[in-house]
Image (cartoon, helix red, strand yellow):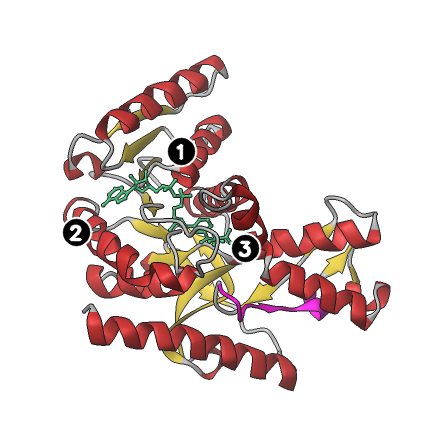
Amino acid sequence: MINKKVGIIGVGNVGSTLAYTLAHKGICSSIVLKDIRENVVEAMALDISQSANAAKSHTIVHAAKTGKDLKDCDIVVITAGVPRKPGMSRDDLLLTNAKIMKNVIEDIKTHAPFSIIIIVSNPLDAMVYTALKTSGFKKEQVVGMAGILDSARMSHFILEKVGFGAGQIESSVMGGHGDNMVPLPNYSTVAGVAITEILTQGEIEQIVEKTKNGGLQIVKLLETGSAYYAPAHATSLMVEAILDNKKKIYPCAVMLDGEYGYKNIVAGVPVMLGNKGVEKIMELKLDERQKELFENSIKSVKSLIEVLEERFF
Ligand SMILES: NC(=O)C1=CN([C@@H]2O[C@H](COP(=O)(O)OP(=O)(O)OC[C@H]3O[C@@H](n4cnc5c(N)ncnc54)[C@H](O)[C@@H]3O)[C@@H](O)[C@H]2O)C=CC1
Ligand SMILES: O=C([O-])CC(=O)C(=O)O
C-alpha cells in the first residue's frame, strides 16, 4: 500500500497497545490516533512516537484533531467501545457499542473511503455487521479480529497440557466470537501432528472449554476491563498482512455470501488477507458435529443482528 498509514480509533487499552506494537514493528510510515479523550490521545501519540524513536523505528505517531486527519489511511482499526466487566457478556455491550461504531464510521466514510477497516470492538461479529451496514463499504473492506486471538488462546492451553512444542502449535477456531465459538481440534496441531493423536477426548474437551472462556477468565481477574496484549498483537498481524499484501490465511470475522451455506451473516472463518482486505474465504471441510456447532454460533450472532435491526438501524 502506498501511504503505509494506519488509523486507530479508540485509544484505550487495546488501541494504545496496538499503536505501540505497530510502531515498534516499523511496518507503517505513520499512525494516527483518534479518541474522544483529547489530552490522553495527544499524550499517547507523543509517548509512543518517542518510544519508536528510541527504538530507531521510522514510524511517526500523531493524534488526530479531527476526522480529516484520517485522510490517506490505508487501514483504520476500530478499538473504540466499552469493554465488559465481571458479570457481563460481550453481548451486553451491543447497543452502547453500536452507537459508538456508527459515530466513528462516519469519519472513515468521509475521510478514508478506500481504507480497509479492521473491527475489534465487541460484540465483534455484530460490530462488523454494524460497520458494514453503516459504511456501505464492500464486504472485502471490513474484517473483524477474533479468530487469531481465540486460536492463540487454544494454543496456550494445548501447550499448558502437553508441555512441549512451544511456538510450534497451530490451532483453529471458527464461528462467532462468543460463548458459541467453534474450536476445531482436528485442524489443531503440535509440530504438524493433530492434537487428536496426542490427547484424549476428555483432555481436548477441557482445552475447548478453556478456550471458550479465555476472555472471561481475564475479565474476572482484571475486574476493570478485558484482555489487551494478545488482542493487540493479533490485530497487528492482520494490519501487517494487509499493509504488506502478505496473502496470509487467518481466521477473521467476515460477511458470508453463500460460504458454508450462509448469507448476510458475519462469522469467523479462515480468510486470505492482502492489499484488498479479505481476498478469499477458505471453506474447511467440517464434520456433522462441527456443522451443528457452527450453525449454533451463527444463530447466536443472528439473534444480536435481529436486535440491531429492530432497535438500532
Ligand atoms: N475482538 C476481540 O477479540 C476483542 C475485543 N475487545 C473490545 O475492544 C473494545 C476496546 O477495549 P479496550 O481497549 O480494553 O477498552 P478501553 O475502555 O480501554 O478503550 C476504549 C476507548 O474507546 C474510546 N472511545 C469511546 N467512544 C469513542 C468514540 N466515539 N470515538 C473515539 N474513541 C472512543 C474511549 O475513550 C477509550 O479510550 C471493547 O469493546 C472490547 O470489548 C477487547 C479485546 C478483544
Ligand atoms: O472478553 C472480552 O470481553 C474481550 C474479548 O473479546 C476477549 O478477550 O476475547
> Is residue 44 rendered magenta in the image?
no
In terms of sequence position, does the residue under pointer 1 or pointer 2 come before the other?
1
Mark 1 within 8 Å of ligand 1, using the beta carbon: yes
Q: Are marks 1 and 2 in contact (CB under 8 Å)?
A: no
Residue at image mark 1:
16
Q: Which residues are magenta?
A: 178-187
Mark linked to residue 255: none
- Residue at (44% x, 20% y) in the render: 52
Amino acid residing under circle 3: Leu
Amino acid residing under circle 2: Glu
Amino acid residing under circle 1: Ser
Question: Which callout, 2 or 3, points to the residue nearer the camera?
Answer: 3
In the picture provided, is 225 more to the left or to the right than 10? Answer: right
Q: CA distance from mark 1 to mark 2?
A: 22 Å
Residue reaching furthest to the top: 54
- Residue at (78% x, 63% y) in the render: 195
Residue 199, by quadrant, is bottom right
- Residue at (29% x, 27% y) in the render: 40
Q: Are marks 2 and 3 in contact (CB under 8 Å)?
A: no
In the picture provided, is 133 more to the left or to the right than 277? Answer: left
Mark linked to residue 216: 3
The quarter of the image holding the C terminus is bottom left
Residue 173 higher or lower than 113, as above or below: below
Mark 3 within 8 Å of ligand 2, using the beta carbon: yes
Residue 68 image point, x, y percent? 15, 37
